Image (spheres, helix red, strand yellow):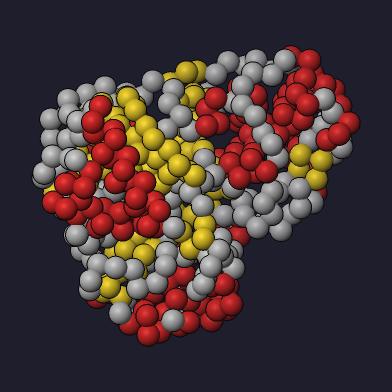
Amino acid sequence: MDASKTIAVIDIGKTNAKVVVVDGESLREVAARTMPNGVVQAAPYPHFDTEKLWAFIVESLGALNREHPIDAISVTTHGATAALVGDDGMLVLPVLDYEHEGPQELGEEYRTVRPRFEESGTPVLPVGLNAGLQIYWQAKRFPEKFAKARWILMYAQYWSFRLTGIAASEVTSLGCHADLWEPREGRFSSLVEGQGWRGRMPPVHKAGDVLGPIRPEIAQAAGLRPGIPVHCGIHDSNASLLPYVLTRQAPYAVVSTGTWVVVMAIGARPVALDEARDTLVNVNALGDPVPSARFMGGRAFSVLGGKSGDLPPEAISEVLARGAMLLPSLPEDSGPFPGCKAVWTVARDELSADAAQAVIAFHLALMTATCLDLIGAEGSIIVEGPFAANRAFLMMLRVATGRAVLAGGNATGTSIGAACLAAGSAPEPALVTIDDGLPRGAADYAARWRALVTER
């Protein structure tokens, strides 16, 4: 399509859903609408409110189109989520919330049929974070409903299906710790074949492929022009990665921040990934395997009452002087230190409010540095998303890694990345180089944090 056109991006994160309008020439956000993305706590299990989201999407497309006429639509969503769709295009079961514990009741049984980590790049994860386990559990616990499923769709492709009526599979979503894809072989996994799901998996498309035009009745309901092309869609962390894949020379790493902090290394040195520490192999939009690691940094930031922005020097000095630290992990069931409970080395109520914010930022930076080490990341480190505005986080990450840290200039990196699919290109992202603004003692602080977590 003409790169000067206007692109609408449906961007569904675990915490918030957005519809964003991006200028296709500059690839800058020009308008957005947002809503909280909650979970319905009702039978048959906790699930996403897809109808509420759908109403928001259609209404937002219409409202945004009136100010910025839309020429193409792209989709990006969080991972670890699958939708089971029947012949009539309707869900045969609600879209399960991946934080539901239910699938783990079959966890031991599932481990006997799942592919090996070496094949799928997928570690065994808690709750429903392995999409393959979700599907296995749904098939076993709701066999009559499951039998009616014509398609198993990953979440981004569920929304592009609703927009077009065309079912598709896509590798960034299949390869997101799902047990459904073999990244190095570029094929569906032994789990898919062994469970007889292959016939329910739609044809594989590239993330940027145009699946088809928007369905006429949706265009009419939203007041859109007929025939707007809808692109297949992409997993959100890979959307953040895409502009760099298209424009930057390896080696480098991208830190995509949101509910999850996902660290992805391009051109990494070869290392043996440790599946017990939440490392994995993602698949980028070009189909290439990408060593990755993750933790729920955005969730921890929210639970701890974290705030972004600059902190006064005296707050940072207080933290370094007192050695005040937050040791991992929060939440304790994910990330590089599974099973470890969070501990403040100095009680939070003994610190000033700003000093507590510095401790939180330093903790998240040191967790991120640990993830970078685990996947053999080399070269500069690019931070995308909300943490790109947290200067204390960025400065400690620079100190802890000894490498250049660059902050992305846009807090909605996932939306811009998804827009690249429709634009067919990506400009060199605007990045800000972070200077070493921490006082003496910061490197010793980072070394001490590492020593303490090693002892736990």
Position of 143 relative to 326 (above/below) = below
Q: In the figure, is residue 185 to the left or right of 399?
A: left
Closest to the observer, 424 or 24: 24
**Residue 193's spot in the image, x, y percent?**
32, 77
Closest to the observer, 343 or 190: 343
Closest to the observer, 119 or 391: 391
Query: Would you say residue 273 is visible in this rendering?
Result: no
Question: Quadrant of the rendered structure where residue 421 is?
Answer: top left
Q: In the figure, is residue 446 to the left or right of 71?
A: right
**Residue 415's spot in the image, x, y percent?**
36, 36
Query: Would you say residue 35 is visible in this rendering?
Result: yes
Total numbered labels placed on residues in the image: 0
**Residue 166's spot in the image, x, y percent?**
19, 60
Position of 234 relative to 377 (above/below) = below
Which residue occupies the extreme bottom position in the image?
A: 144
Position of 43 relative to 255 (above/below) = below
Residue at 35 percent across and 60 percent down: it is 154
Residue at 72 percent across and 15 percent down: it is 312
Question: Quadrant of the rendered structure where residue 152 is?
Answer: bottom left
Closest to the observer, 66 or 449: 66
Residue at 25 percent across and 67 percent down: it is 89
Question: Quadrant of the rendered structure where residue 359 is?
Answer: top right
Q: In the figure, is residue 2 to the left or right of 456?
A: left
**Residue 332's spot in the image, x, y percent?**
69, 54
Q: In the figure, is residue 330 to the left or right of 116?
A: right
Which residue occupies the extreme left position in the image?
A: 227
Image quadrant where one finds the N terminus: top left
Residue at 71 percent across and 58 percent down: it is 339
